[in-house]
Amino acid sequence: MMCIYEYEVKGLLRQAGIATPRGKLVQDPGQAREAAGELGCPVVLKAQTLVKARGKAGLIQFADSPQEARELAGSLLGRRHHGETVEELLVEERLFLQTEMYLGLAVDYSNCRPLVLASGGGGVEIEELAAQSPERILRLPVSPSQGLLPGQARQVARFLAKGYHDPSLEEELGRVVSAMYTLFVGRDLEMLEVNPLALVPGRGVVALDGAAAVDEDALWRQPDLVRPRNQSQEAFQRERDFRRRGWSYLRFDGDIGILSSGAGITMAILDLMRMWGGRPANFLDTAQMDRQGIYDAFQIFKDDPAIKTVLVNIFAGLNRCDHLAEGIKDFLSEHRPRFQLVVRMAGNREQEGRRILEGIGVTPIGELEAAVRRAIEVTEERS
Amino acid sequence: MSILAFKDTQVLIQGITGKAARHHTENMLAYGTRIVAGTRPGAGGQQVAGVPVYDTVAQALERHRIDASILFIPAKAVKDSALEALRAGIELLVIVSEHVPLHDALVIMEEKERQGAVIIGPNTPGMISPPENAILGFVPTRYFAPGPMGVASRSGTLTYELVSRLTAAGIGQSTCIGVGGDRVVGLRFPEVLLRFQEDPQTKAVLLVGEIGGTMEEEAAELVGQGRVTKPVIAYLAGQTAPEGMKLGHAGAIVDRGRGAMKHKIEALESHGVQVARQPAEAIELAQKVLE
């Protein structure tokens, strides 16, 4: 799941013919003042972060003058929000709306169907509404091969426009939901939501906020959506490289690096480690458990100063312990890493792998739990 | 007996000429799986490990009875190959490929429903029925042994870890199915449980779950309804995983609070499914329920 920024979502919505407020993306307070002058006050300043819940965090502010916009921009830029730094603001005209609605597209994974989610009440309380008055949320399953049918679009529009007795509003909402569904499938989105979808006097239906997540497995057919988001160029390149290789990598704040193959077993190792008081630094799941893959993985651990110990878990089913041991040997013959090494090795060609490692002074452990305990112990001894 | 794959199950390999497919075809044949044909557009007339290759699934079906197809196909092409097999009437598909795009998987699953077929995967090492000497996929066969335990798992390597310990403890398996690590998969825990319930050789079931999704909760509900009366135990990976970040409301509205680890464990335990906290405990639970 790859989330994209609000201003990107709004760009996609506009391309699909859905109205959004007039706005400008800015990177510094001076630009914010200019934007406010051009758009006309009042304006709203919205911090661009991937993690939402910005309103409660004070990351959405209103300004009545360009000067105020400049000052507010100064206080918003550089703020931290769940590990992200605010680097860009979307300055938009402030619209005074008549009604807030909710319109979302998601996947019901248990039934393997896309779902249209719609509610006549929008805003941040939508989840509460869904829990307490489920009848006030429309959930409409869609056939993946047929797409959203015209009759279904009308059904959603009627539900949203209930009580307005306005055929042209119904028609406009029908057009919006169809356009959103086309976007959802055409851009390989896992989730797309407009909340609120507002009714603005004189302007019609306007998407005031938008969120979307792109399917990472389909990025090859959405190349224009691949770009760094709140990360260094270096981190972005690394992420791309990992994706190309089919590796997954997650960083935590501990001091034990974990190299393992398969998400399930790696999560099981993290569980054991945390239950027994160890602190995982990261998790690297390499699909490529061969000589070169192991060597390359060790490069990542070497470059991370927080890592005191590396735990390698190899349960060789299809791959071979001796190849993996050769990869470790290759690395250690060229580098003198700061970290201590604990290896759990079992399975295919275990004896051969063991001999190679013992030849370079590393004694592999045969049992998973013992290896996790050992990794925690040697890390504690060092600190 | 086992479920889904048997001694006489006749198997097609789609994409049989690829390097990995060749290798796994040889391993499957060696274990006893009856692989009768392969496909690869443009390679019709060739042979791989003595197995005849055809250009299309339809051509293979003219010459052979085919009960199941295993797709060794790049993710980008899985949709077309899966639809080809389903529309030709093949009733069991194993999709091993990782990284199948979500919207492609949704189209595949809809066609599966329409055809009344069964799909295992995507993103799975496949399945094995040790009593029947049948493997569809590439689980490492040496860790498996025939016996009373049915196993269904969302994770390949974690399955090998647990099953090798079961086998070492003298507990063999009736059938072991990797249901797939993706959010959209064909055969899900509830359907696997119902099949194990019907299978006389299966005496108990081990579910190997993970954080996320709602499959574990659905399995728990089924047990709660009394539709599965054999003992079911579970081990879940990700018990200490931090909660995900808030990225929007849609996911929460769809899942209605399910998917979190706490909720999964509560759901399973409240319906009498014991949940192991550690891998070793899963083996102890298995021994206990089989006594």
Image (spheres, rainbow, N blue to C red):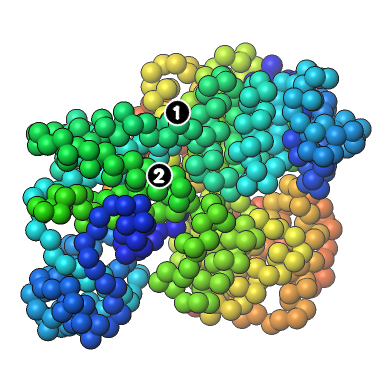
Query: Residue A227 at what x, y percent from top left?
Result: 48, 68
The amino acid type of the residue labelled 1 equals Ala
Q: Going by the picture, which residue comes out furthest to the bottom?
A: A30
What SS does tag 2 mark?
Answer: helix
Closer to us: B290 or B130? B130
Distance Cα–Cα, label 2 vs label 1: 34 Å
Residue B46 is left or right of residue A219, and the answer is right
- Of the pair A254 and A262, the residue shown nearer to us: A262
Q: Is residue A269 above or below residue B205?
A: below
Q: Secondary structure at mark 1?
A: helix
User: Where's residue B266, x and y in %?
Assistant: 35, 36
Q: Nearer the viewer, mark 2 or mark 1?
A: 2
Same chain assignment for discs 2 and 1: no
Q: Which quarter of the figure has residue B2? A: top right
Task: Identify residue for label 2.
Answer: A182
Say which residue appears at 79% left-offset and 54% top-offset: A320
Compared across the picture, whether B44 is left or right of A215 comes to: right
At 65% across and 17% down in the image, what residue appears? B201
- Location of residue A269 by image quarter: bottom right
Mark 1 burial class by Cα count in 10 Å: few <14, some 14-19, many 20+: many
Instruction: Say if residue A197 shows up in the picture.
Output: yes
Q: Using the rendered view, name the quadrant where residue B72 is placed.
A: top right
Residue, disc 1? B219
